[in-house]
Structure formats: structure tokens, C-alpha cells
């Protein structure tokens, strides 16, 4: 009798176990399937129009006048690249400098305060960055350098600040992951701390640092709200740092509310291009960081 | 264990249930379309519902093109358009419910007081780049426009630009408010917004010698006027007709005037 009860209890446990496993599986796959649905939907909505007007005129055309059925995404593609490059020019030096100081040239106490604060930066909504940009940065640029203020420069600065937390926290992690024996060996050989950073730690942590930069780049490419507010959104390849610029993301968000028919499809096509760019960036980031894991 | 899971799922289901029913306050008449007309339609709907308790009038935005499409497909009884109908949209029944002036606005400190319509066209096509040529300072003109698809841009394109394109380098923003905000900040900027939305932050330019005001629009001297349209599949009937009649009545038109638009007569 006792044995039978025990047996039944075990059966129930097993059944519960299966149930939980099944439930978790369903939940886990629902996340994947959302990605699948989004991909299929965007591609299905966006690709027909690309082929209808010709891939070349769609990607390389310089004019964007959807009301006249003229869809050229080239200015937006170049715009996204410019703004992202600008963000990296600002984000990389500041981010890496900060990461080095935090790992090598500061006490544990300082690190314990500063690192969470930097990570907090990542939690500030992008609309707040955009608003600060419009209120402070844009008038400053207009008064100091001329031009409309809404510009490549403004967008680069704000995006550069926005990608700092990504670059800093991943770089700090990968610098800290370098085995202490490397550092000790270098110091023992008579190298200064800066020489140690430059010649030992940096090469050892290189793939992690590259991954941090690529992830930051992904954030800069995908950022929408802040760019709409401060970039000026002119659908033209900017002639200078002070000229307005439109990115792929802004193009979608700016026009989606009133877009119908082919205009709407062209915005989905913009999404396809953006999707491809982000996918490539993420794949590269994954590849470099998995190489890091394999290396000691 | 099993029951706990069941309870959690039930809790989630219950939590989502009200969300499914949340929007279902009673709706008897739906208007959709131009975001330029939406605030005024909201006012009309509000007063109309006060007079007819128990009736629900739902006003949605989405833009002129969306409203026209929604009206064609029957998703709403009345579509709102802040531009003229074009092409295959013309088979819809249209009623002008109000008119709106388009103001060309600049920073209050801008010394330029007035321009010609042809000059406005040159500014927005990118051919006229300096304020100096208009009697202002020797500074580049910052041109601010609306995004493709916007009813205000559509009306401006039709009334000013004709077949000429607004040049690519123009700063593009997605609402009247943002355009006004940028021009209020930038002493060299120029843009266009609804006359009713001009405030003390910006100044409207005279056009061909006529100041942008109601009087000049009514006597036809100020040319940049666009109609606000209600469109429907066939002549409106039933509740839609009642609503349109109210909007066109003296009371409805008085509301229009109070909110900064121009009545039809």
C-alpha cells in the first residue's frame, strides 16, 4: 500500500515535470516565432515593390518623392552610415578610455560606484536624449558653427553618448576577463601600466572590445526617436557635418503615419534594408565574441 | 502544482480580458482622417454628443489619405481630408466643412515682412537660398517642410509648388507643432503651418501684399487657403447626415471660428 502511494507520487511528479518542460518549450519558441513572423511579414510587404521599381533604382536612387512614386533610398542609406560613423568616432575613444580607467587605473571602490552609473545611462529613454539634444545641443551648434543646428554633427554627438554604456560595460567585462597572470607577467618584465594596457591587455581583450563596438554600432543604426528629433530629416546626402540628414529608421517613423499603398510598401522595404544591416552587424558581433570564448 | 499553473494562466487570461473589451464604449458614428481636422472634429463631436446623449461619435486621426481609404472601405462613415480629392478618390461625396489658411511663418526677429507667391515657390524648390535676396540679412535660408503624405504638405504642394518639387535638402518634420517649434528657435528658418496654429512664437509673412488673416482670406486677397473636407460613400444618411448638418449649422460653424479656422461662408 505504502509502495503504491509512493509510486503514484512519483508518476505525478514525472507528469508535472513533462508539463513544465512542455510549457517552457512553448514559451521559448513563442519568442523565436515572433521573430519569424516579423521577418516574414516585413519581407513579404517590402520586397515586391523593390523588384517592381528595380533594385538598383531603389537602393541607388537619390530622390525620395513617394507621392510621385519615386523611391530612392540612397540618401537614407548613406545618412545612416554617416550618423553611425559619427557616433562611433565620438563613442569609441570616450568609451574605451573610460573602460581602461575603470579596469586599470581606479580603485575597486570607484569602479563599484561608476560602473552601475554608466549602465544606468543605458536605461534613459531615447526621447529624453533627443529632447536634451533639441533644447541644448542644436541651438549651441547653430550659434557656434552656423547652419540649422539640426545636423549630422548633433545626431552623431547624441548617438555617441547613447552607445557609451554598451561600449564601456562590455569592454570592461572583457578587459577584466584577461587572466591576471598576463598583467603580472607584463609588470614583472618591467613594463609600465600603460604599456601593459597597450601591448598586453588590449590585444588579449581585442575580440570582446570589437564586439562591444559592433553592438554599439547596432544601437546607433537602430536608434529612431532621438535621430528624428535632432537630425533634421532632409532626404538628401549631407554635404557637410552641419547639414541635416535622414536615416533609414527616421524615414520609416517619420512617414508611416500617413503612408498608404506603395508609399507604405516602400517604408516596409526600408525596413528590409535596415533588417539586413542589423542582421549583418549582429552576426559579425556574435562571430567575434564566440572567438573570444574559444581563446583562453 | 498543476493548480498553481492553472491559476497563473487564469490570472493572465483575466488580466488581458478587459483589454479586449476596453475600447468598446458605444460608437455609432466614426470619423477618420486628417490630423489637421481632428482637433476640430473632436470639438464638433463633443458638442454633438452633448446635444444627443446616448450617442457615441468616435474621431480618429491617421491622415487624409488613410481617412479617405477608410471611408472607401467602409471602416468609417465619414472621412476627413485636408486636401482636395484626386484621381480615383473623386467618386466619393465631398462636403467642405471649413477652410484653413496656410501661413508661411518665420522667426519673429526676421526683418522680412512679406514675400511673393513665386518667391515662396523658389524658396521651397531650393532656388532661392539667402534672405538677402528678399531684403533680409545675408544668411542662408533654413527651409522646413512636412513629411511626404501629410495633408498640409499636400495642400502646400498643390497651392504653391504645382509640379515643382520641394527640394531634398529641406528639413522635414512630422507635425505642425514641431515645424513651429523649430522656426521659433531658428532666426533663419521658414516653414508653413495651419493659420489657426500660428502663435506669438512665430510670425506669418504677408503674401503678395496681403497679410495672413481671416479678413484677407474671406475677401480673396490671401491665396493660400485649403478646404477641410468631409467625404463619404454617397450622400451621407442617417446619423452621418445629422452630424454633417450640425457641423454646417450656424452653431457648428461658430465653433470653427472660435477654434481658429474659417467658416465656409
Image (cartoon, rainbow, N blue to C red):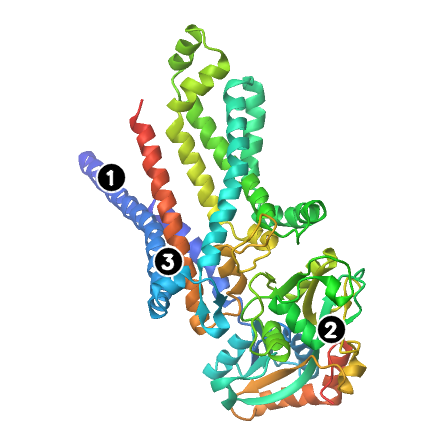
Give the crowd class for mark 3: few <14, some 14-19, many >=20 residues within 10 Å.
few
Foreground: B180 or B49? B180
What residue is shown with label 3?
A: A38
How far apart in space, not on screen, are marks 2 and 1 (Cα)? Answer: 75 Å
Mark 1 or 3, closer to the camera: 3
Q: Chain of mark 1?
A: A
Count of residue discs: 3
Could you tell me residue A154's position as x and y percent?
61, 47
How far apart in space, not on screen, are marks 1 and 3 (Cα)? Answer: 44 Å
Q: Tell me, yes or no, whether dots 2 and 1 are on the same chain.
A: no
Foreground: A54 or A256? A54
Q: Chain of mark 2?
A: B
Could you tell me residue A137's position as x and y percent?
66, 45
Give the crowd class for mark 1: few <14, some 14-19, many >=20 residues within 10 Å.
few
What residue is shown with label 1?
A: A9
Q: Marks 2 and 3: in contact by CB < 8 Å?
A: no
Could you tell me residue A245's position as x and y percent?
55, 54
Q: Earlier in the sequence, mark 1 or mark 3?
A: 1
Q: Quadrant of the N terminus of chain A?
A: top left
What residue is shown with label 2?
A: B196
How far apart in space, not on screen, are marks 3 and 2 (Cα)? Answer: 41 Å
Compared across the picture, whether A76 is left or right of B116 comes to left
Q: Quadrant of the C terminus of chain A?
A: top left
Mark 2 or 1, closer to the camera: 2
Label 3: state its secondary structure: helix
Is residue B233 visible in the rendered image? The answer is: no
Say if B104 sits above or below B73 in the image. above
Foreground: A205 or B191? B191
Going 68% across and 69% down the picture, which residue do you hit? B192
Amino acid at each position: 500500500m505504502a509502495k503504491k502511494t509512493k509510486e503514484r507520487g512519483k508518476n505525478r511528479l514525472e507528469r508535472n515535470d513533462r508539463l513544465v518542460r512542455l510549457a517552457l518549450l512553448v514559451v521559448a519558441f513563442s519568442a523565436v516565432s515572433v521573430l519569424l513572423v516579423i521577418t516574414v511579414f516585413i519581407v513579404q510587404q517590402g520586397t515586391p515593390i523593390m523588384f517592381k521599381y528595380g533594385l538598383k533604382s531603389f537602393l541607388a536612387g537619390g530622390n525620395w518623392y513617394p507621392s510621385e512614386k519615386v523611391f530612392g533610398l540612397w540618401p537614407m542609406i548613406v545618412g545612416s552610415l554617416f550618423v553611425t560613423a559619427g557616433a562611433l568616432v565620438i563613442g569609441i575613444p570616450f568609451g574605451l578610455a573610460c573602460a581602461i580607467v575603470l579596469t586599470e587605473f581606479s580603485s575597486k571602490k570607484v569602479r563599484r560606484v561608476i560602473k552601475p552609473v554608466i549602465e544606468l545611462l543605458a536605461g534613459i529613454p531615447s526621447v529624453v536624449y533627443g529632447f536634451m539634444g533639441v533644447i541644448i545641443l542644436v541651438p549651441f551648434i547653430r550659434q557656434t558653427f552656423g547652419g540649422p543646428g539640426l545636423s549630422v554633427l548633433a545626431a552623431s554627438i547624441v548617438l555617441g553618448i547613447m552607445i557609451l554604456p554598451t561600449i564601456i560595460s562590455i569592454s570592461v567585462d572583457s578587459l577584466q576577463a584577461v587572466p591576471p597572470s598576463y598583467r603580472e607577467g607584463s609588470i614583472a618584465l618591467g613594463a609600465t601600466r600603460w604599456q601593459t594596457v597597450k601591448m598586453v591587455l588590449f590585444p588579449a581583450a581585442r575580440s570582446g572590445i570589437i564586439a562591444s563596438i559592433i553592438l554599439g554600432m547596432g544601437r546607433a543604426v537602430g536608434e529612431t526617436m532621438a535621430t528624428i528629433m535632432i537630425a533634421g530629416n532632409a532626404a538628401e546626402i549631407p554635404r557637410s557635418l552641419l547639414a541635416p540628414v535622414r536615416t533609414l529608421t527616421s524615414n520609416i517613423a517619420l512617414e508611416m503615419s500617413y503612408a498608404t499603398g506603395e508609399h507604405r510598401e516602400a517604408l516596409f522595404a526600408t525596413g528590409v534594408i535596415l533588417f539586413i544591416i542589423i542582421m549583418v552587424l549582429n552576426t559579425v558581433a556574435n562571430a567575434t565574441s564566440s572567438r573570444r570564448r574559444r581563446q583562453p | 502544482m498543476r493548480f498553481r499553473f492553472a491559476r497563473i494562466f487564469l490570472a493572465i487570461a483575466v488580466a488581458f480580458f478587459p483589454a479586449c473589451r476596453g475600447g468598446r464604449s458605444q460608437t455609432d458614428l466614426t470619423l477618420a482622417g486628417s490630423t489637421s481636422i481632428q482637433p476640430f472634429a473632436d470639438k464638433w463631436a463633443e458638442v454633438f454628443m452633448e446635444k444627443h446623449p446616448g450617442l457615441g461619435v468616435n474621431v480618429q486621426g491617421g491622415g487624409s489619405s488613410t481617412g479617405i481609404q477608410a471611408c472607401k472601405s467602409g471602416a468609417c462613415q465619414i472621412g476627413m481630408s485636408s486636401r482636395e480629392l484626386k484621381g480615383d478618390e473623386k467618386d466619393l461625396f465631398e462636403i467642405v466643412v471649413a477652410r484653413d489658411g496656410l501661413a508661411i511663418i518665420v522667426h519673429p526677429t526676421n526683418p522680412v515682412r512679406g514675400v511673393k507667391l513665386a518667391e515662396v515657390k523658389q524658396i521651397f524648390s531650393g532656388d532661392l537660398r539667402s534672405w538677402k535676396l528678399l531684403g533680409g540679412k545675408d544668411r542662408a535660408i533654413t527651409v522646413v517642410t512636412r513629411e511626404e503624405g501629410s495633408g498640409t504638405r499636400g495642400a502646400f504642394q498643390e497651392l504653391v509648388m504645382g509640379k515643382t518639387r520641394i527640394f531634398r535638402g529641406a528639413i522635414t518634420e512630422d507635425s505642425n507643432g514641431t515645424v513651429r517649434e523649430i522656426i521659433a528657435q531658428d532666426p533663419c528658418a521658414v516653414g508653413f503651418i495651419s493659420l489657426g496654429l500660428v502663435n506669438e512664437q512665430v510670425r506669418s509673412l504677408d503674401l503678395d501684399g496681403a497679410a495672413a488673416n481671416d479678413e484677407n482670406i474671406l475677401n480673396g486677397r490671401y491665396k493660400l487657403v485649403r478646404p477641410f473636407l468631409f467625404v463619404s460613400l454617397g450622400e451621407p444618411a442617417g446619423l452621418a447626415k445629422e452630424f454633417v448638418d450640425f457641423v454646417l449649422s450656424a452653431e457648428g460653424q461658430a465653433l470653427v471660428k472660435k477654434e481658429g479656422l474659417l467658416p465656409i461662408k
